[in-house]
Image: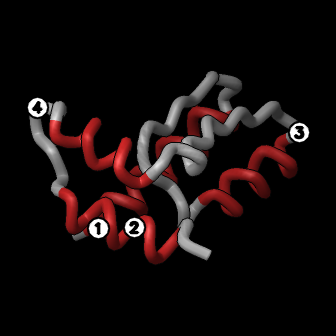
Amino acid sequence: REDVVTMIENSCVDAGLHKGYSVIVDATNFSSMNKWKQLAKDLKIELEIKDFTDVPLNTCIERDQQRERPVGKLVIEQMYNKHIKK
Protein backbone atom coordinates (compact mmCIF):
# COMPACT_ATOMS: atom_id res chain seq x y z
CA ARG A 1 0.00 0.00 0.00
CA GLU A 2 3.03 2.23 -0.34
CA ASP A 3 1.45 3.95 -3.34
CA VAL A 4 -1.56 5.03 -1.25
CA VAL A 5 0.64 6.26 1.60
CA THR A 6 2.79 8.22 -0.87
CA MET A 7 -0.28 9.80 -2.45
CA ILE A 8 -1.60 10.88 0.96
CA GLU A 9 1.81 12.21 2.01
CA ASN A 10 2.13 14.21 -1.21
CA SER A 11 -1.34 15.69 -0.81
CA CYS A 12 -0.70 16.71 2.79
CA VAL A 13 2.69 18.27 2.04
CA ASP A 14 1.34 20.10 -1.00
CA ALA A 15 -1.69 21.45 0.87
CA GLY A 16 0.38 22.56 3.85
CA LEU A 17 2.96 24.35 1.75
CA HIS A 18 0.34 26.08 -0.40
CA LYS A 19 -1.27 27.37 2.82
CA GLY A 20 2.06 28.75 4.04
CA TYR A 21 2.81 26.16 6.72
CA SER A 22 6.26 24.83 7.54
CA VAL A 23 6.25 21.13 6.67
CA ILE A 24 8.56 18.39 7.87
CA VAL A 25 8.78 15.08 6.06
CA ASP A 26 10.60 12.52 8.20
CA ALA A 27 11.42 9.60 5.95
CA THR A 28 14.04 8.08 3.73
CA ASN A 29 13.01 9.93 0.60
CA PHE A 30 15.67 8.91 -1.88
CA SER A 31 13.16 8.48 -4.67
CA SER A 32 11.12 11.63 -4.00
CA MET A 33 13.91 14.13 -3.31
CA ASN A 34 13.74 15.74 -6.76
CA LYS A 35 9.99 16.13 -6.40
CA TRP A 36 10.38 18.09 -3.14
CA LYS A 37 13.17 20.22 -4.64
CA GLN A 38 11.01 21.12 -7.64
CA LEU A 39 8.00 21.94 -5.47
CA ALA A 40 10.11 24.22 -3.27
CA LYS A 41 11.47 25.95 -6.37
CA ASP A 42 7.99 26.36 -7.86
CA LEU A 43 6.62 27.82 -4.62
CA LYS A 44 9.78 29.88 -4.03
CA ILE A 45 10.20 28.49 -0.54
CA GLU A 46 13.22 27.35 1.44
CA LEU A 47 13.93 23.64 1.48
CA GLU A 48 16.24 22.12 4.04
CA ILE A 49 17.44 18.57 3.50
CA LYS A 50 19.21 16.59 6.21
CA ASP A 51 21.55 14.30 4.33
CA PHE A 52 23.02 11.40 6.27
CA THR A 53 24.44 9.52 3.31
CA ASP A 54 27.96 10.10 4.62
CA VAL A 55 27.32 7.93 7.69
CA PRO A 56 29.22 4.64 7.31
CA LEU A 57 27.16 1.53 6.60
CA ASN A 58 28.28 -0.23 9.79
CA THR A 59 27.28 2.79 11.86
CA CYS A 60 23.80 2.72 10.32
CA ILE A 61 23.46 -0.97 11.14
CA GLU A 62 24.64 -0.40 14.72
CA ARG A 63 22.23 2.52 15.21
CA ASP A 64 19.37 0.49 13.78
CA GLN A 65 20.00 -2.25 16.34
CA GLN A 66 19.44 0.32 19.09
CA ARG A 67 16.01 1.35 17.76
CA GLU A 68 12.79 0.20 19.35
CA ARG A 69 11.66 -1.21 15.99
CA PRO A 70 14.78 -1.90 13.89
CA VAL A 71 14.41 -2.42 10.15
CA GLY A 72 17.26 -4.91 10.12
CA LYS A 73 20.68 -5.25 8.55
CA LEU A 74 19.38 -6.66 5.25
CA VAL A 75 17.07 -3.68 4.62
CA ILE A 76 19.83 -1.19 5.39
CA GLU A 77 22.28 -3.01 3.14
CA GLN A 78 19.73 -3.09 0.30
CA MET A 79 19.10 0.66 0.62
CA TYR A 80 22.83 1.32 0.73
CA ASN A 81 23.47 -0.80 -2.37
CA LYS A 82 20.63 0.82 -4.28
CA HIS A 83 21.12 4.47 -3.37
CA ILE A 84 24.63 5.09 -2.06
CA LYS A 85 27.19 2.48 -3.09
CA LYS A 86 29.28 3.68 -6.00
Q: Amino acid at mark 4?
A: Glu
Calculate the distance from the C-alpha at mark 2 to the C-alpha at mark 1.
16 Å
- Sequence-wise, which precedes: disc 1 or disc 3? 1
Q: Quadrant of residue 32 in the image? A: bottom right
Camera-side mark, 3 or 4: 4
Identify residue for label 3. Answer: 44
- Sequence-wise, which precedes: disc 3 or disc 2? 3
State whether residue 59 is above or below residue 33.
above
The residue most toward the left is 68
Calculate the distance from the C-alpha at mark 3 to the C-alpha at mark 2.
31 Å
Disc 1 crowd, CA 10 A, few/some/many (<14, 14-19, 20+) = few
Left or right of residue 22, residue 70 in this image: left
Camera-side mark, 1 or 4: 4
Which secondary structure, mark 4?
loop
Identify residue for label 1. Answer: 2
Residue at x 49% of width, y 38% of height:
25
Residue at x 63% of width, y 23% of height:
21
Identify residue for label 2. Answer: 79
Q: Amino acid at mark 3?
A: Lys
